[in-house]
Amino acid sequence: MRRLRGWLWYWVPVGLWMALIFTASADSASAPRTSRIIGPLVRWLFPDWPEAWVEVAVLVVRKLAHVVEYAVLAFLVWRALWRPRRPELRFWEWRPAVWSLVVVFLYAVTDEYHQTFVPDRQGSLRDVLLDTAGGILGLAFAWGLTRWWYRSPARKERTAGAAASLGAGGS
């Protein structure tokens, strides 16, 4: 039971995030619909901008959404694959990172394929590349986070304490 709970702790967020991405691929997140929200917000923030700039800002926000959603997906998949069990584990392993990127790429491909069946949406190779770039950024964040964590003084004290108890016959 404990093992199942651990598995769920790591993989349920991945499934929920994938469901969120799938939902965002529907018509409700199409350019005409999201532009009705983003456009007025940009106009309110920058009332002197010409309409062409507003349109560019809307496009940039929409594409940044791709990057962010796939950065989060890559981080969650990496977290589920890496799952540090002991404090003395190395701070970074490439295998979970590579597999996370493979999952991100394949999910991006299926997401864009799904969009070919949705009115007002179209699949795009450019978006797959953008999503994959987001995955790389998510993994860079994971690398930075683990590097910071493994260099933190509090962690070093806990690791030294755990190693001492293991060496003394503790568990």
Image: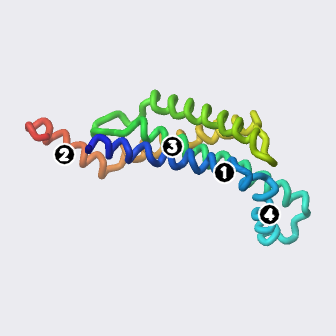
Quadrant of the rendered structure where residue 162 is?
Answer: top left
Instruction: Please state which of the two labelled residues, at mark 3 or mark 1, is closer to the viewer.
Output: 1
- What type is the residue that disc 1 sits on? Ala
Residues packed near mark 2 inside 10 Å, few (<14), some (14 to 19) or many (20 plus): few
3 or 4: tag closer to the N-terminus? 4
1 or 2: tag closer to the N-terminus? 1
Alpha carbons under labels 1 and 2: distance apart: 46 Å
Q: Position of residue 74 (x, y in %)?
A: 54, 40
Which residue is label 2 attached to?
A: 161
Alpha carbons under labels 3 and 1: distance apart: 19 Å
3 or 1: tag closer to the N-terminus? 1
Compared across the picture, whether 88 is left or right of 130 comes to left
Which residue is label 3 attached to?
A: 75
Which quarter of the rendered picture does the N terminus lie within?
top left
Q: Nearer the viewer, residue 117 or 144?
A: 117
2 or 4: tag closer to the N-terminus? 4
Circle 2: element type:
helix
Instruction: Please state which of the two labelled residues, at mark 2 or mark 4, is closer to the viewer.
Output: 4
